[in-house]
Image (cartoon, helix red, strand yellow):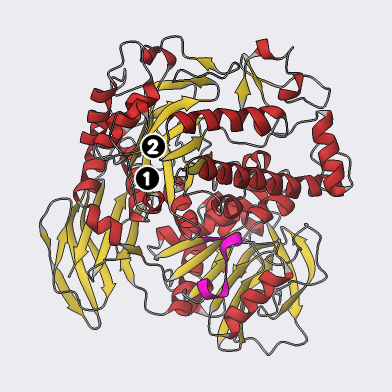
Amino acid sequence: MNENNGNRTWRKDPSFWGTRFRLIQPNLRKIDAKGLDVRALMDEIAEWGANAVLVNGGGIVAWYPTDHPHQAVNEYLETDFVAEALEAAHERGMRVLVRMDVSKSYPQLLERHPDWFRRDAEGRVATHWEMLTTCPTGPFWEDYNFRVVEELLGRYPDIDGIFYNAFGYLRCYCERCKRLFKEATGYELPLREDWDDPAWRAFVRYRYDRHADYNRRLAEFIDRVSPGTVLTIDTHVTLDSSAFIRESGWYTPQFASANACITSEAFNFLDRPYPRWVYWAGEETKIGGHIAQTCIILSYSKTIYSRRAAQPAPQIGYDLMQIAANGGSPAVAFSGMFDQDDRQSLPMIRRVYTFLRDHEDEYAAMKPLADVAIVYSQRTADVYGRERPAERWQDHYRGMYEMLAHSHIPFTVLHEGSVTLEKLKTFKCVLLPNIAAMTDEEAALFDRYVEEGGHLICTFETGRYDETGRERPEPALRCIGRTVTGKLDDPYSYLVMRDKRWLEEYPETDLLLFTGPFLATAPRPDAAGPLAEDLFGVPSVRNTTPEFAYWETTEDMPGLTIHACGRGTAAYLPWGPDKLYRDLGVPECRSLVAGLVKRAAGELTAACDAPREVELQIAARGEGGYLIHLLNGVGARGGPLTETVPVSGVSVRVRGAVRSARSLVTGEACPVETDGEASVITVPRLELFDAIITE
């Protein structure tokens, strides 16, 4: 209890951040403080269906009467905003995160505190617009930040949690940063990214470890000053540019061990690269959900430079439901309050939030189901992807993700840092999309998973490099039964099939288009004979004049091998069907991989006949039965989702006997038919999304 919150006692509950909460962030501009009615704002947030709110606090601009001499108070502030926001939110039963930012400070402080600020390689102070960026090892982070937090929590012990914006460990070349790195590693701080330089590779690891350690110390300090107050930070689990994750020092499993939950941005700005990665919000939820409860923050804005222009309504509704369907906590960050200049998406956000509130018990108890898992590897993006992580690795991973999503196969994603044998054994099949950089321990883990009955599908250079990026003499995985004898650049025009079952979806096709690198392989001496070998290359046809577009020979190097290992199997594709699907959309690649998955996994929990842009998500209900989501992204076609294209008569096949099915969206019953040991549910009409519960 404190004087700013009257006589009312608020009970903090750190376990709340492990639930599927619904958060709204009114990211207030300084000028919004003029005449601000805090109670009316909190009324509106609660009416919209949120049960958590993220409010402005301090760091760069204080929204309370601070006594710290170097923290600037918002000059438009008329009252103690933090005190009013806490009291009003708590009266309405909402939890409160208070926003801090120590990434930047003011130019007028440079002369008095030169050691607070980042330096570039030439010794110049690094700027962000008109502000100066701060050094992550300096007194601003190590002293100033702790003193401001101490003041904030001393004044307002009812704060439920502290949230840090722009919490990145940006490169700094001040003398202190150079000295600390040299003491920790023995190397001079590298001046540029050079993956052949051991100092650079050491710096990448050092930054992840040091930033996670700072995060841990900050979390412990917050809990010590105000027991029960939690820490969470602004981060990314994945990103269009995974190099930005590296440059920020974020390695999700390390951070999550100290934070109450993962709070990750998936700002679906319109200036993201094409083709748009439409699965970002759901993808981050899948990955994070295996580590800690994951809150995905969406931006209401079209771009960071156009904060007052709204996202298309279908796009933000689709993203919110991706988060919910995968068991995450949705959040939306507004520029200012609800009196937006562009109000087109407000009704959609309110519709989704109130829907999730009205069915809170269903979403609180649901458990996402997946027959299959893809492995995500930030390490491979770093030490193998190097300066071209998207081209060398991320295209493989995203192509694999798209192939499963477009095939309506229930799947999830495991971050390499969260993989355990126990977790692997919960999946019938695990996919390694060019997971090139792998430790010996990880390789042994995957081998054991196969030996104990699991099924693995690996592509291209999986396991060919160690955790530092050095090439191995042979792939780390024994279960694939192959050793690499060479790497061929663009050697084939086609891969021809001897067994038609690999492309059951295309019975009139005897070959696959091929382009890109291909690994020549030989049987591993200690491996048993393969269960299958197929997809043999046709030497590249360089002259595509019609008269010369033929071939007379086929190589004997297989593009697909399947080996038994213990009670399981490992399929190996020493090329990139995943990347071909991502880059060119080759449909036969999707059919090939989906077929391998289905043969390995057997009867899947769910399937459907919707267009490929409709996502199928399935979860177990708390009281039995299924919670099935259909998310309609048909209108996107590589760009933002600006309209909903209705889909009629979608059939969803689920394992087991279903007595009845009902839409939570329309409230209407869905027809159900029995088909052997499965049931088929018909959804008469699908708009942007539907959520079906079964008995």
Q: Would you say residue 182 sits in the magenta stretch? A: no
Q: Helix or strand or loop: what does disc 1 sit on? A: loop
- Residue in view at x 43 percent, y 54 percent: 293
- Residue in view at x 62 percent, y 36 percent: 168
Q: Identify the residue under disc 1.
A: 12
Q: Nearer the viewer, residue 400 or 492?
A: 400
Determine whether 651 is above or below 249 in the image: below
The image quadrant that residue 193 belongs to is top right
Tags 1 and 2 touching, CB below 8 Å: yes
The three-letter code of the residue at mark 1 reads Lys
- Residue in view at x 68 percent, y 56 percent: 380
Left or right of 426 on screen, residue 450: right
**Mark 1 or mark 2: whose residue is earlier in sequence:** 1
Q: Quadrant of the N terminus?
A: top left
Q: Position of residue 294 (x, y in %)?
A: 44, 50
Q: Would you say residue 415 sits in the magenta stretch? A: yes
Determine whether 262 is above or below 340 in the image: below
Numbered label attached to residue 164: none
The three-letter code of the residue at mark 2 reads Asp
Image label count = 2
What separation in Å lies between label 1 and label 2 (alpha carbons)? 7 Å
Q: Helix or strand or loop: what does disc 2 sit on? A: loop
Q: Quadrant of the C terminus?
A: bottom left
The image quadrant that residue 345 belongs to is top left
Q: Position of residue 416 (x, y in %)?
A: 60, 61
Q: Identify the residue under disc 2.
A: 158
Left or right of 425 on screen, residue 537: right
Range of magenta residues? 414-423
Left or right of 327 on screen, residue 128: right
In this view of the protein, can residue 632 be seen by the observer? Answer: yes
Q: Nearer the viewer, residue 654 or 67?
A: 67
